[in-house]
Image (cartoon, rainbow, N blue to C red):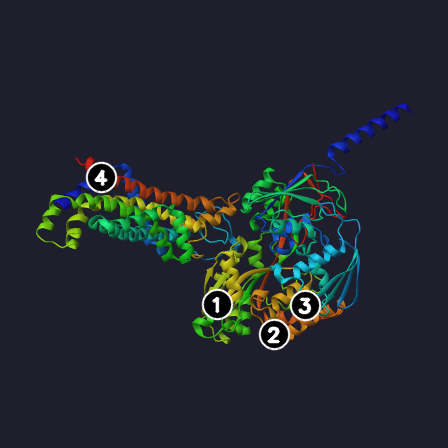
């Protein structure tokens, strides 16, 4: 009996030691260093547009609702909401949220933030609230939005970090300096920002969700992806959010790489603008207006083989068939069966039928990242098989964007990403209202598709919306304004000292939420 | 008579100089490669074969294949055309303009001299690659623009050297004599001044070729050079960067060839300088 007790005590002690050594359970304290590909542009949510600014804003601020790790819309600053009429939304705020300056967040802050976004004087780079007619505070913790017309994806709009809630007095105190000294209500407080070197945040102990485990978070810009990979392998940084396509396999074993299906749609944009393309300038007509030519391009491009070459090991899992993420509730699987597949002979035949057996000359406009450059080069070689002589042009980003929006190209290797609502993909990419800078760079116009997308945005039930979007997807799958390529996977590679960190499908990091509280050893 | 003996003597000296001979042999081989590219290249340099990506050097692909399965040997062979063409034509353009500007400045002197040489000084103030980058930024990509971008930074150097020798020549007795019998300025410059000032310019030209090739490769490396898929060594080196851990031959091979061509022209240029240097003339 005594012996047994002795064993028991020893075993218990051993277990306690083991548990404490192996660090089961979160540890408080420590610094997490995250590499970003670029320095942020601004930390003022209203003025931010780029991914990198958003990722930091996400840590310093909160918004009314958010997407959780599964892609579901969940309450954040609100307790609940109601949509009593199609054009009216009422939100009840939490009463225990304080800003970093110690003041309680109220309905007035929400109203002021929204008004600031809507005010033309603010010159927000994207008018996120174009559908809102009026915002008002009903009482201290109740906000009401009145919309111009029914707008189903409204919650998804509010979930964007661009609509994070800002304390009015800080903007009044700091003016434009707020962009470099942000004050929010998020899990981490802003400490300092040294341009092109680092952004430092520290723990906000009074955070309403939970006290963050991390003492400090540092965001460091590392523009060269291969350098970032080295940095995480040597432990110089803890987390990187991108890896080179060809390093995926290697980083999986060496760098704890997580690969998530992402929301970035990559595609070859077939410019159907009747007049602006360089093809039109040379020949007086745009061959891409002929469906047979678009079919030929799709048939000649062996997407599966290309993806397996560009993203070895994961090529099959990232294939895109249409403009909507396969995980979306509105995704229509029928389009996969409608995809043209690979058939070079049929492609040549279609080119001949369309009167272009001898091909033509055209220009490919491509983003300069490794993956899209690779696709442009393979596309160029593919087009040659159809006797189409293509040149590749990759000007710097500003020029490229301008030319894409002006329609000054023939084929483009582009990308698009949005919130998970189907409206954010289908409407911007395919509705003829959005030719050019809106996002419809294919200058695609199809009256039934326009109508279906309008209905999809305004219909009140999910089922109804789904039916409109499903129909639109089928038309687009037949009309082929794009060569759909892939969904850019979200990557997250980290050192082994980081725990509880998961890749978010939108490419940001959830460090503290009701589900997770990231910690480091 | 004197001219021929100078050339003969220069050649004799060059042949005795082992470094120079090495350089000349390297250049000759690269020239041969460039000219015979379509015959000796084992395959189309732009033929994509996605099934055979990133192969290490083997019997069928002596230098291996790149990320698109293209034969690196063939790309190196075709790439020599670009490098040599850019190197020679950039120096030709730079030398021509530089000599024109330098000799005008040196011969006419005064306000012309001031204006031309201060302009040259301004150009000289910029580092070569930075200036070339700015030029590419303005002109856009393309072979011709690449030549111009590599040529323009070399103009001030040629202009300065030409001007200084022309200044010295202008005061010589035979130029004075020519002026005295009424020869035109153009005749004097072409007939008497330039032929006697050209040796240092030629040496400089030979040495500048390697710089021009390096500038062009740097521009391509930075993505400002020639349009893909044209095989250019600098661009190949740059594209290989992403595979440096698992397929280092993608960048090592074009890097070696850039080194080789630069070494060749530098050795030959140095030898030429030694051979033409009047102080070393026996």
Q: Nearer the viewer, residue A36 or A228?
A: A36
* Residue at position x 50%, y 54% in the image: B68
Tag 2 subunit: A
Q: Which residue is mark 1?
A: A386
Q: Which residue is mark 3?
A: A334
- Label 3: how many residues lie within 10 Å, few (<14), some (14-19) or many (20+)? few
Quadrant of res A467: bottom right
Gap between marks 2 and 4 measured at Cα: 75 Å
- Label 1: how many residues lie within 10 Å, few (<14), some (14-19) or many (20+)? many
Helix, strand or loop for disc 2: loop
Gap between marks 2 and 1 measured at Cα: 27 Å
- Which disc, if any, is residue A446? 2
- x then y, percent, for residue B223: 45, 52
Tag 4 subunit: B
Mark 1 and mark 3 in contact? Answer it, CB < 8 Å.
no
Gap between marks 4 and 1 measured at Cα: 56 Å
Closest to the camera, between mark 2 and mark 4, is: 2
* Residue at position x 15%, y 44% in the image: B171
* Residue at position x 73%, y 34% in the image: A22
- Which disc, if any, is residue B275? 4
Helix, strand or loop for disc 1: loop
Gap between marks 1 and 3 measured at Cα: 28 Å
Q: Is residue A311 left or right of residue B136?
A: right
The answer to whether any part of residue A261 appears in the image is yes
- Label 2: how many residues lie within 10 Å, few (<14), some (14-19) or many (20+)? some
Mark 2 and mark 3 in contact? Answer it, CB < 8 Å.
no
């Amino acid at each position: 009996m005594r012996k047994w007790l002795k064993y028991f005590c020893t075993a218990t002690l051993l277990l306690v030691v083991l548990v404490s050594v192996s660090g089961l359970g979160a540890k408080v304290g420590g610094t997490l260093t995250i590499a970003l590909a670029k320095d942020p542009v601004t930390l003022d949510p209203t003025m931010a547009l780029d991914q990198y600014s958003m990722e930091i804003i996400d840590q310093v601020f909160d918004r009314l609702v958010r997407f959780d790790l599964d892609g579901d819309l969940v309450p954040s600053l609100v307790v609940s909401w109601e949509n009593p009429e199609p054009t009216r939304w009422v939100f009840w705020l939490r009463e225990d949220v304080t800003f970093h300056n110690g003041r309680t967040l109220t309905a007035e802050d929400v109203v002021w933030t929204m008004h600031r976004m809507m005010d033309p004087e603010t010159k927000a780079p994207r008018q996120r609230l174009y559908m809102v007619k009026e915002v008002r505070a009903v009482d201290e913790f109740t906000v009401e939005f009145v919309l111009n017309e029914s707008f189903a994806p409204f919650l998804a709009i509010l979930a964007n970090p661009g609509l994070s809630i800002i304390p009015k007095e800080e903007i009044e105190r700091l003016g434009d300096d707020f962009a470099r000294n942000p004050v929010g209500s998020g899990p981490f407080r802003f400490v300092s920002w040294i341009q092109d070197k680092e952004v430092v945040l520290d723990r906000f102990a009074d955070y309403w969700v939970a006290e963050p485990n991390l003492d400090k978070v540092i965001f460091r810009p590392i523009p060269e992806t291969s350098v970032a990979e080295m940095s995480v392998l040597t432990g110089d940084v803890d987390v990187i959010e991108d890896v080179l396509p060809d390093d995926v396999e290697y980083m999986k074993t060496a760098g704890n790489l997580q690969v998530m299906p992402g929301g970035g749609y990559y595609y070859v944009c077939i410019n159907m603008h009747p007049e602006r393309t360089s093809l039109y300038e040379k020949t007086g007509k745009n061959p891409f207006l002929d469906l047979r030519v678009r079919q030929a391009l799709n048939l000649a491009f062996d997407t599966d083989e290309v993806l397996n070459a560009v993203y070895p090991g994961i090529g099959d899992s990232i294939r895109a068939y249409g403009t909507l993420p396969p995980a979306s509730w509105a995704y229509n699987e029928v389009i996969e069966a409608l995809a043209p597949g690979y058939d070079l002979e049929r492609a040549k035949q279609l080119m001949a039928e369309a009167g272009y057996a001898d091909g033509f000359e055209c220009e490919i406009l491509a983003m300069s990242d490794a993956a899209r450059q690779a696709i442009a080069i393979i596309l160029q070689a593919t087009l040659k098989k159809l006797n189409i002589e293509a040149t590749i042009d990759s000007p710097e980003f500003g020029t490229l964007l301008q030319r894409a929006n002006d329609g000054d190209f023939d084929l483009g290797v582009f990308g698009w990403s949005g919130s998970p609502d189907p409206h954010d993909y289908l409407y911007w990419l395919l509705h003829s209202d959005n030719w050019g800078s809106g996002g419809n760079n294919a200058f695609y116009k199809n009256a039934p598709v326009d109508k279906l997308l309008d209905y999809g945005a305004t219909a009140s039930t999910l089922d109804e919306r789904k039916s409109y979007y499903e129909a639109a997807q089928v038309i687009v799958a037949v009309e082929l304004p794009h060569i759909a390529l892939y969904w850019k996977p979200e990557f997250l590679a980290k050192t082994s000292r980081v725990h509880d960190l998961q890749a978010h499908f939108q490419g940001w990091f959830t460090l503290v939420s009701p589900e997770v509280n990231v910690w480091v050893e | 008579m004197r001219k021929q003996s100078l050339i003969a003597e220069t050649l004799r000296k060059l042949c005795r100089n082992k470094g120079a001979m090495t350089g000349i042999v390297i250049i000759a081989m690269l020239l041969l490669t460039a000219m015979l590219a379509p015959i000796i290249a084992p395959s189309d340099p732009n033929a994509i074969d996605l099934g055979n990506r990133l192969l290490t050097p083997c019997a069928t692909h002596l230098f291996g294949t790149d990320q698109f399965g293209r034969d690196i040997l063939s790309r190196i062979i075709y790439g020599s055309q670009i490098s040599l063409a850019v190197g020679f034509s950039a120096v030709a353009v730079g030398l021509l303009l530089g000599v024109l500007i330098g000799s005008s400045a040196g011969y006419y002197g005064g306000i012309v001299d001031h204006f031309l040489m201060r302009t040259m000084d301004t150009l000289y103030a910029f580092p070569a690659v930075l200036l070339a980058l700015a030029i590419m930024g303005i002109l856009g990509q393309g072979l011709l623009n690449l030549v111009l971008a590599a040529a323009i930074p070399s103009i001030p150097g040629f202009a300065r050297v030409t001007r200084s020798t022309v200044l010295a020549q202008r005061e010589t007795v035979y130029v004075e004599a020519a002026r005295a019998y009424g020869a035109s300025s153009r005749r004097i410059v072409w007939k008497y001044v330039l032929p006697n000032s050209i040796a240092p310019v030629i040496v400089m030209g030979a040495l500048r070729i390697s710089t021009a090739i390096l500038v062009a490769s740097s521009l391509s490396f930075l993505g400002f050079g020639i349009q893909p898929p044209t095989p250019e060594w600098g661009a190949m080196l740059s594209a290989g960067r992403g595979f440096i851990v698992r397929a280092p031959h993608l960048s090592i091979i074009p890097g070696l060839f850039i080194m080789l061509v630069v070494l060749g022209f530098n050795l030959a240029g140095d030898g030429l300088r030694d051979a033409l240097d009047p102080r070393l003339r026996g």
